[in-house]
Image (cartoon, rainbow, N blue to C red):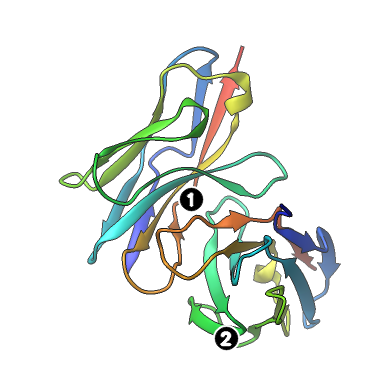
């Protein structure tokens, strides 16, 4: 079984400041890693994913994440946030084999203020 | 390209009643997955349908059932509703069942059980 821990339920930050949202996972099998974003009253949208290769993954809206296998982490970063980045961010994992199901963390609410 | 659409967007039921939620998958997608997102939690996998067959199931009781139709749209049925079934129900479509593919989510159906 897989599990995902997002260490911060809420992260307040000022506009144009850098931000890091933390994600750790646990799994007995190989996994793929994902970050999804959920804006208010909307569904989830894929930000980025790690399948293989370079451990630094770039996504949409200027976000990037780094896969660290030894620390079983996949932290999300952005060098300069905007008000429009205010949303709930979910880290998720899926097995590399079998049907495509995602195991999500509880989410981190990013609150960007002016 | 039409995205994933879900109906109804909101509904209120009482304990013991039955509910049907509907999902139209994104054009060209043959796989539909359903997730339950309780307040303050990440989405939890209910089940997946591929070409009209259940392809995988999470840890949900049998009173959660589903269907997929020849046009790949899907229904989620919940019988004997309980208070804890109150949640946002998300439908996600994808092409095929491989874990490398992106899931496209609808905006969800918010169910309140009184």
Placement of A83 over or under A55, stated as above or below: above
- Residue visible at 50% across and 79% down in the picture: B57
Residue nearest the viewer, comparing A32 with A89 = A32
- Residue visible at 57% across and 21% down in the picture: A112
Provide residue B20's location: percent of width, then percent of height: 78, 77
- Residue visible at 58% across and 65% down in the picture: B35
Tell me the distance, in whole angstroms, between the alpha carbons under discs 1 and 2. 29 Å
Residue nearest the viewer, comparing A81 with B52 = B52
Residue nearest the viewer, comparing B11 with B66 = B66
Provide residue B83's location: percent of width, then percent of height: 70, 71
Looking at the rendered image, the quarter that the C terminus of chain B falls into is bottom right
Chain letter of mark 1 equals A
Provide residue A54's location: percent of width, then percent of height: 24, 39
Q: Badge 2 is on which residue?
A: B53
Q: Nearer the viewer, mark 1 or mark 2?
A: 2
In screen coordinates, is B58 left or right of B110? Answer: left
Q: Badge 1 is on which residue?
A: A106
């Amino acid at each position: 079984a897989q599990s995902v821990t997002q260490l911060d339920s809420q992260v307040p930050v000022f506009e144009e400041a850098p931000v890091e949202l933390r994600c750790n996972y646990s799994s007995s099998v190989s996994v793929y890693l994902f970050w999804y974003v959920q804006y208010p009253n909307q569904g989830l949208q894929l930000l980025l994913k790690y399948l293989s290769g370079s451990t630094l993954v770039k996504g949409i809206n200027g976000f990037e994440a780094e896969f660290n296998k030894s620390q079983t982490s996949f932290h999300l970063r952005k060098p300069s946030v905007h008000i429009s980045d205010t949303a709930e961010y979910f880290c998720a994992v899926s097995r590399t084999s079998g049907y495509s199901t995602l195991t999500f963390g509880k989410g981190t609410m990013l609150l960007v203020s002016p | 390209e039409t995205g994933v659409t879900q109906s109804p967007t909101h509904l209120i039921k009482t304990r013991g009643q039955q509910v049907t939620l509907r999902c139209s998958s994104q054009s060209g997608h043959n796989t539909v997955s359903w997730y339950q997102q309780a307040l303050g939690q990440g989405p939890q996998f209910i089940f997946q349908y591929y070409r009209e067959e259940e392809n995988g199931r999470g840890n949900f009781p049998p009173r959660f059932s589903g269907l997929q139709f020849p046009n790949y749209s899907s229904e989620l049925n919940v019988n004997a509703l309980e208070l804890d079934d109150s949640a946002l129900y998300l439908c996600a479509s994808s092409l095929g069942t491989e874990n490398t593919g992106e899931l496209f989510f609808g905006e969800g159906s918010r169910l309140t059980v009184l």
